[in-house]
Image (cartoon, rainbow, N blue to C red):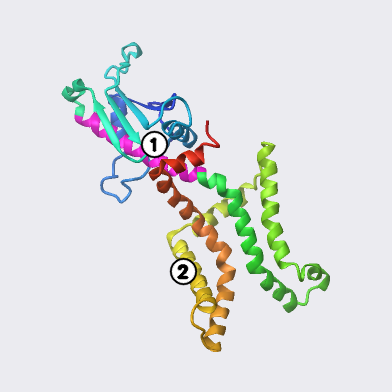
Amino acid sequence: MVATPDWLAIVDDEISLRLSPSVLAQIDLDTQGLATNDDRHAIIYKVNSQKLLQVLASSVGMASLRQGAIVIWTYYNDNIGNSSQVSESPILRTLISIDGDLSQKVCQDILKHPQSDRILKAHSFLVGQISRQFVTAIADYIEEKLRPFAIAIISFVTTVTWYEPLQNINKRFDLSANLIAPLANQRWLIAIAAPITVLMVWGIYANLNLKLPTLPRNSQKIFTKLLKLLERQISQVLAIAVVLTLFLGWVAIQVAIPIDNHWNNLIITIQSYLELYLPIAIVSLRKSIVSGLGPIFLRYPFFVKLIFGRFIR
């Protein structure tokens, strides 16, 4: 992945691609090996997510006067050495509707150009690069807005599931009763207070436009590696298995036909161990859940307006 190149720009909520022989050569160089690898859909040219969201908001009528489609203009200039000869007439116009339909208009003269195949191929590749990033931009935006609520939920679940084990540790090591006595019968009060405190602190920082203090660099590396480990596919599969097992165990005990005490006690024991992993499972599944919301919001324009109408103008 590389930073947004200077020939790819967003102006007035429209995307502009200015191609030239050197740009085509650079695209060929950057995409070498993609056809033989499983990474064909990799994002090579990263576009600013906030600007993409602005374009998306414009396409649904939430910003500027344009609405109905995402507009991509493509220009081509053979004489890159002389800026005065740069063509201001587009050779391609691509419209991507909010429901995924795509339409294009091509300048007839470009079809006779000796580099027409390379130009059209590069244009199609770049349109694919941009369109895939709309989904990730929505996912990143939703994750940013839901982050305080995710932290609040994790704090609530952690308090509920780890309260008794911590008490048992205190009893096993015979720690001072003064450390745990004030909290002995306040499990649910603490569980409710934890997410409320998280949301209050987050709200204060957001409304005052302050930044949360940054962790030391070494700590950041540790947490980044830990988060990547938790977001790996095997970790997500394990998290799904834990959540399903807990749910099925609850159904078996509460809803299903009564079972004998032996199986009932076995299920309760399994649940008591799996519940400790539940907060970690939520962290593993958080990004997958948010990423899955992106295509849903793109498929239904109403949700896009509902989400962006409040935050983007």
| Residue drawn at point x = 32 percent, y = 15 percent | 86
Distance in Å between CA atoms under marks 2 and 1? 36 Å
Quarter of the view holding residue 87:
top left
Q: Is residue 213 visible?
A: no
Q: Position of residue 218 (x, y in %)?
A: 61, 50
Q: Nearer the viewer, residue 150 or 252?
A: 252
Dominant secondary structure of the residues highlighted in magenta in the image: helix
**Which amino acid type corresponds to the residue marked 1 in the rendered image?**
Tyr
Q: Secondary structure at mark 2?
A: helix
Which residue corresponds to mark 1?
A: 45
- The relative height of residue 282 versus residue 42 in the rendered view (above or below) is below
Between 102 and 237, the one nearer to me in the picture? 102
Instruction: Name above or below for residue 270 compared with residue 84.
Output: below
Write down the residue under mark 2. 241
Q: Position of residue 243 (x, y in %)?
A: 50, 67
**Kind of residue at badge 2:** Ala
As for residue 133 lying within the magenta part, the answer is yes
Residue at left offset 65%, top offset 47%? 215
Q: The N terminus appears in which quarter of the rendering? A: top left
Asked whether residue 276 is drawn in magenta, I would say no
Disc 1 residue crowd, few under 14, some 14–19, many 20+, Cα 10 Å: some
For residue 41, side relative to residue 307 (left or right): left
The answer to which image quadrant residue 254 occupies is bottom right
- Please tell me how many numbered marks the rendered image carries: 2
Of the pair 83 and 217, the residue shown nearer to us: 83
Q: Residues within 10 Å of mark 2 (few under 14, many from 20)?
A: few
| 11, 27: nearer the viewer | 11
> Would you say residue 17 is visible in this rendering?
yes
> Helix, strand, or loop for circle 1?
loop
Question: For this view, does 301 lie left or right of residue 103?
Answer: right
Q: Give the residues in magenta.
A: 117-141
